[in-house]
Amino acid sequence: MRSVVRALTALLVAAAAASYGLVVVDPAAAAASPAGGCWAYRPALDPAPASDISTALEPWTTVADGGFLLESDGATAVGRTRTATATIASGPVISSTDDVTGTASFLFSLDGQPLAEPVEVSFDVEAGDPVEDLVAEAAIPIAAAGAHTVGLEGVSFDVPAESLRVACNGQETGTPGGTNPATVPEPTDLTTDFAAVAASSATITSVADQAVLDTARPGDVVTVALAGLASSAPASLRLCGPSATGATGATCLTVGDVVTEPDGTATATLTVPGTAPVGAGTLRAGDGVTEVSTPFAVLGVQLVAAAEKLGVDSTTVTLTGTGWDPTRPVAIRGYAGTSSSTAATADPTVTVAVTAAGGFTADFEVADKATKSVIVDQARTSSHIGAVYLISGVIGGAGAPVEEPPVDEGEDPDANDPTPDAGDETTDSGGTSTDAGTGTDTAVVPPVEIPLPEDVPVVVPTPVAPTPDATEDLAVSEVRLDGQATLSELFGGSPRRDLIFLVENVGAQTVTDPVVRVAVGRSDDVEPQLVDAEVGDLDPGEQSVVTVPLELPMAAFGGYRVVGQVGDTDDGAFALKWSTYPWGLFALNAVALGLLGWGVQRRLGLRRTPAAALDVPENGEAVVDLAAADAWWAYRNGTGPRPVPDATVAVASAGVATEVLSTEPPAPVDSGDAVVDLDAAESWWERSGAKSSRNAS
């Protein structure tokens, strides 16, 4: 009895294994797949324990290439989250007899530690087909800097309706009731590595023509190193100016783009544009999720302000500079003209260092009468920048001693002074007076000393950087001709189109209604002419669409050149081609020529066709059967019987072959028989007579 039970049990196990499609595959023929294999079993359900269905280790896939892939992308900085993606193009066959629906649970690990929860992906597969196109994504938190490894621990396929679970992992042993992927799971050998940094960063590594790394002026080339951004992701670079008080954000200008490396790093090079916001700001880089920044200042035009102080023999000019290249020296010299191309004067050169903020203060003493200007010059790596100050022209003259007029001997210096001196004595008695006299012992009161005027500083207004013409900051783009060829244009009418273009103020100043010039011509040197087109006022960054109607003369044919200009600079110039052809006129001419040729050909063909010749008997006999005609007339006159024809013959018109209506050969004509159908002839004569009667009436 026990042997029978054992046999039945073995049959049931074999049948169940066949039902779920878990057929043993020769390991040598197994497809490329992760290490280990799969094991099918019934999970434990209270009160029934777990039971094995597989009898041997099953492969991950039954095809040549299962398309197993594990990769990660996203953030590379501590505190952020990276995404791990596992892909199975073709996995195991879950059931060979039933269509099944279930859930695949992917368990990921980070640095050998399984994540807390698996990632579930539903599947729906037909009987006998493998599970295909499974993609599972897991969030990988980055907690520490350094190298990390993401792994796939295993995948479990659950079919609740069938009470079936297939566990696939790195376990390479499959023993029923012993060690197998379900009882002792092992991680697979599918792994992927990435490196993380402590924090995302942007570091400027070089600035051409500058001695510092946090300041540049328009035209300078800046190299920046990025780290901690997303892997293999596009990132943009922006220059942002200082934020206004109370503003929510600074004005930013995009200056470049870069694609990061798989480790989230990138090296980008950018040129500071002339439209970059001036002042202390930031250089920012972002991938759409992470943004990094570093302090960065854009210099404006270098300026210098001056104040003069008169000395006895010279004038001291105090110069205050702003907007100069930081930490580089400037040289201050006097020149005999208003530019450095003139001769330098004898005034000593002064050299002073520029601060990290781009400013300096220096005193320059002007003693040479030939000095007309003071020029500040700064040498850069590949060029020079400078500023000119024109002195007032007054050199020295302050604090000189006042010369006393000479006094002649014997002359009383107080003779003309109405105020008596303290040394004079006046008496009323005796009517005499005693004068101190003019001897050498006489005390001489010196003249009152007049104080020198205080030094009055010469306040020179701060030079203002020359403001470029606002129209130089206009850019024209998206130039096109709008309109379709009309029926009139196809037959030689005047072509009309609308010239449409976009005008943008790319500068920092408002532009007020710039002029628009447009012209159309065949030559390349056509000059644009002023047209009535309104652009309006454009604030910085504002755009305006301008439409100018254009018209060509009638019967215009071929290519034309449309040129235009907004403002007076090259950025506002544009040109495009305009081609027009009166195709309808061409078609009419072609049809007329075709009809003319057809008519000529027909006329020539008629002339060449010869007239058809009559078949006249050669022996001089009459064409008409005279005997038949006499018999017919005799019948008409009532002197003879009615003729009866033996054959019906249709008489053809002159020049055309006759058509025999009867296929039978004609019978010989007896004597007195008419060749013509007398009945038809009689009917025709009757109709002719009736018609003649009607015409007569």
Image: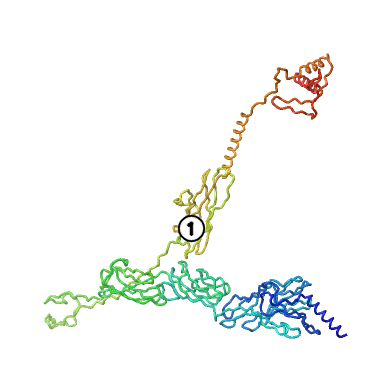
Frontmost residue, 132 versus 297: 132
Label 1 CA crowd tier, 10 Å (few <14, some 14–19, many 20+) = some
Residue 348: quadrant of the picture: bottom left
Q: Position of residue 210 (x, y in %)?
A: 41, 73
Q: Is residue 104 left or right of residue 552?
A: right
Q: Is residue 653 left or right of residue 220?
A: right
Residue annotated with mark 1: 513
Residue 634: quadrant of the picture: top right
**Secondary structure type for disc 1:** loop
Residue sitting farthest toward the front: 619
Residue sitting farthest toward the right: 1
Q: Amino acid at mark 1?
A: Asp
Residue sitting farthest toward the top: 639
Quadrant, the C terminus: top right
Q: Position of residue 517 (x, y in %)?
A: 47, 53
Frontmost residue, 453 versus 270: 270
Q: Position of residue 102 (x, y in %)?
A: 74, 75
Q: How many numbered marks are there?
A: 1
Q: How is the image coloured?
A: rainbow
Q: Position of residue 233 (x, y in %)?
A: 57, 72
Q: Is residue 609 left or right of residue 371?
A: right
Quadrant, the N terminus: bottom right
Q: In the rendered image of this protein, does residue 592 appear above or below residue 636?
A: below
Q: Residue at x 43, y 61 (%)?
A: 469
Frontmost residue, 9 versus 275: 9
Q: In the rendered image of this protein, does residue 393 appear above or below residue 446?
A: above
